[in-house]
Amino acid sequence: MKKGIIFDVDGTLWDSAKPVAESWTLMLERRYPELARIITSDDMYRNMGKTKDAIGADLFPGLAPDKRDEVMDACMRYENEYLADHPGVTYPNMKETLAALSREYGLYIVSNCQEGYIEALMAACGIASYISDTECFGATGRPKGDNIRLVMERNGLEKCLYVGDTAMDQEAAGKAGIPFVFASYGFGQASGAEAVIGSLAELPRAVKEILE
């Protein structure tokens, strides 16, 4: 039986709110100074885990849809570049935990982010060799639950779980029909998860209890 662990990114593997906010502010200053908009870490924390459309509606409610898409695309493209030299802060034991888990399970990432963001994370943190496959909203335009199912089907996963830090992550796991492990150290809240971890170091034990 092929078993896997699928991860969320923000609030689960790392915290990139500060450099992402910096990159967006720089792009807005350079290309869209007329908006006079400074993006803060709090803006990002409020929107982490949401889709591009939802983030745009929150941060730029006064812009016409076409203009909002243009601004969002520009900010997200620059964000990927910026993170190469200004990476997020990884949670303790992240790389070591993934390395250990990869010896027993397939590891995957599914996020509501733009294309290129997961790759930026993997490159910055040196974890690409541990990750077998990824999927994101930016590539498919589909909800996270659908993307989890895509990864499961594409990789022939017969038994797996999703690790995330918000109620939205829990809902996505439920829609995909798999157990949810709540990363309580992250940005959000969730209740009724199959397991709760206070750090990534606690994940291997939770995984064994659910998948073995």
Image (cartoon, rainbow, N blue to C red):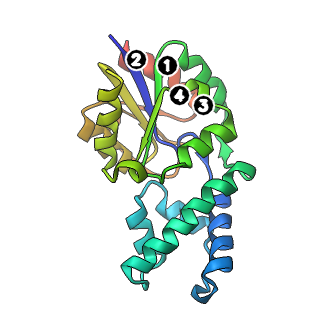
Residue on which the image places disc 4? 131
How many angstroms separate mark 4 from mark 1 (CA)?
A: 20 Å
> x and y percent of residue 23 in the render?
66, 65
Label disc, if present, on residue 128 of the rendered structure: 3
Looking at the image, which residue is at 57% across and 67% down? 75
Q: Nearer the viewer, mark 2 or mark 4?
A: 4
How many angstroms separate mark 2 from mark 3 (CA)?
A: 26 Å
Q: Confirm or deny contact between disc 2 and disc 4 (CB under 8 A).
A: no
The residue tagged with tag 2: helix, strand or loop? helix
* Lower position in the chain sequence, tag 2 or tag 3: 3
How many angstroms separate mark 2 from mark 4 (CA)?
A: 22 Å
Viewer-side residue, 12 vs 157:
157
How many angstroms separate mark 3 from mark 1 (CA)?
A: 23 Å
Q: Quadrant of the N terminus?
A: top left
Res. 45 image quadrant:
bottom right
Viewer-side residue, 169 vs 184:
169
Looking at the image, which residue is at 24% across and 33% down? 177
Q: Confirm or deny contact between disc 2 and disc 1 (CB under 8 A).
A: yes
Viewer-side residue, 155 vs 47:
155
Q: Nearer the viewer, mark 2 or mark 3?
A: 3
Residue 11 seen in the figure: no
The residue tagged with tag 3: helix, strand or loop? helix
Question: Along the horizontal axis of the image, is 101 left or right of 23?
Answer: left
Viewer-side residue, 24 vs 90:
24
* Lower position in the chain sequence, tag 2 or tag 4: 4
Q: Residues within 10 Å of mark 1 (few under 14, many from 20)?
A: few
The residue tagged with tag 1: helix, strand or loop? helix
Residue on which the image places disc 1? 205
Residue on which the image places disc 2? 209
Residue 48 seen in the figure: yes
Looking at the image, which residue is at 48% across and 54% down? 114
